[in-house]
Each structure stands twice: as C-alpha cells, then as structure tokens.
Image (cartoon, grey):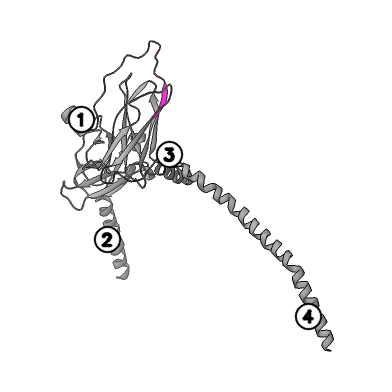
Amino acid sequence: MRKFLALLVVAFLCFATKVYAEDVATVTVTVANFPQKLQNRTVIVTLGNGPSDTKSTIIVLDGLNNYTETVTVVPSEYYCAAAVQYDALGDYPLQEIDQTTFLQVEDGNHYDLIYTLADSSWYESVTGQQRHYTLQPLETPPENYEPKPAQVGAYLTAPVGFSQHVIVYLQNLYTDDVYDLELYESNELAAVEPNALSGKYAFLSAYVVGDAENRYQFNCEQNELSTETGADFHLTVTDTANPDREMNTPSRDQNSTVQAANSFNNKNTDAPQQSTVEPKTVSQPVKQIEKQLDLLSLLLDFMPVVLVGAVLFAVRCKHRR
C-alpha cells in the first residue's frame, strides 16, 4: 500500500510539472539598431492585458543587457508597448518591425518582439514640421566640395551649479543633415558628433529638456562655422529666474583657482588700487629691521652707564667690609 501511494505521488508530481511547463510561454524583447546617441537611455517595454492593466509585465532594456531580455508569461493576449525613458514628447518613438500591438500567447511557444526607432517623431509625422527648430535654406557648396568625415561640437557657458539636460541642434548647410548633441553635467556641458560630414554648419536651436516654462534662454556666439576651421559652437545659457548667477564654462575652465581669480578680476575692475597696496607689503620688513637696529644702538649707548654704575656699586660694598 505504501509503495502504491508513493508511486501515485510521483505520478502526480510528474503530471503537475508537465502541465506547469506547458502552461507558460517565453517572449524575447529586443531593440535593434539603437542609435549611438541614445545608448545612455533606457527603454521600457510593457506586456499587459490592456493599456490600463496595472499588473503588466515590465521589461527594462539598457546597455547592461545589450537591449534584449527574455521573460516568461502565462498564455493570454497581451497589449505591447515600448518607449524611450524620459521622452514624454515622443521625440524618439519605437515601433515593432511587424507592427505588433496585440500578441496572442499560447502554451509552450516562444515569441520575439523587435523594436526599432521610427523615422520621425510623432510631432513631425502629424505636423510635417520639426518641434524644436526650423531648417535653414541650403547653400551651394564650393566646386571642389566632397563630403568627408568630420566632427562638430558644442560647449556651454552656464550658471554655476547648472545640471540640466541640454540638446543642441546643428545643420549642415551643404548636405541638409541635422545633428542633435546632448550636453550633461557629466560630460562637462560639452558634446561632439564624431560621425558628421564636412561642410558649413549653422546653429539651429537649443533647449533644456523638461523646461516647459522656458526658464533657460540660449545665445550662440557663432551662427555659422565651417569644419575646415573647426565647428565648435559656444553657447551661453541664462537663468531668467536668477539672471545674476555666477557663470562658468566647465569644459574650458579646468582650474578652480583660475576660475575664482577670473571671477574676482571681472567683478573688480579698479586694479590700480592694488599697486598702492603692494609697496606697503614690501616695506613692512624694512620698518621692522630699522626698528630693531634703533633698539640695538640704544642699548649700546646705554651700556657704558650700566658698567660704571656696576663698578661704583662694587667699590662701595668693598669699603663697607
């Protein structure tokens, strides 16, 4: 009887395990051809029973998992959605290569969801215009112009302590290519696009991500630059809420002592007063030395009187004895 019960338990466990194994499916989610400029972003993919499902399976894709992950789910119909984190305006929409929005998952099967970046943002696809800039008219390149690999960049002068995320747009006026550069506190508010094409570049615009109130205003020192002489645009951002904040250029001002000195010199332009202070500093040791010499000469002059007094005192004591 005991052997029969043991065999029954084993059979039940085997049967239950088999049912459980078949009662799930796997889904592999991948972001393919993710642009290099977005490699520091995280992609969030959700698999739920609908847009309002609070128990959706959430998949986080980033550089740590090479933007691919496999999850186990129970059979059901899933609503699939993917988005780039911190992209509330939809400037970087993702689309599944097979246009999969609803995925019917069955027992024991495996499914692949592959997302790529859409060709245009939601704003551009609806309005036909760019959200953050207006393209400049193209110019006729020189006769001997041939597009070659080049580098364009931008760096920022900002209030001390500025830690916002800035995006700068530059346009090649010969090829019509537009490059967006992302400036962070971590890259010292400077960025370059090493895979640009040579030519003449124009500054289009810059903005702070999430600055809905337009608190920060930008001014570019150069409107146009050529890669032949170096296309490194210098921008200044002003905090309209605190316009008197001290400014610095993190990518150029490497020495904190120099920064402090420059700041002091800029605020105190009456430098001639410093020349009148320096002679006083130099003359102090001279006065001290003269004072010491006068004291020494006084002691030397007084020494004979002291010696005569000592001799007379000694003679008087001798007579008394």
Q: Earlier in the sequence, mark 3 or mark 4?
A: 3
Q: Secondary structure at mark 2?
A: helix
Which mark sits nearer the N-terminus, 3 or 1?
1
- Residue drawn at (22%, 32%), measured in percent from left and top? 131
Q: Earlier in the sequence, mark 2 or mark 3?
A: 2
* Left or right: 122 in relation to 317: left
Mark 2 or mark 1, whichever is nearer to me: 1
Residue 19, percent from left and from top: 25, 53
Sooner in the amino-acid sequence: mark 2 or mark 4: 2
| Residue at screen point 31% across, 24% down | 177
Q: CA distance from mark 2 to mark 1?
A: 59 Å
SS at mark 4? helix
- Circle number at residue 313: 4
Reading the image, the residue beneath label 3 is 251
> What amino acid does circle 3 point to?
Ser
Label 3 with label 4: CB-CB less than 8 Å: no
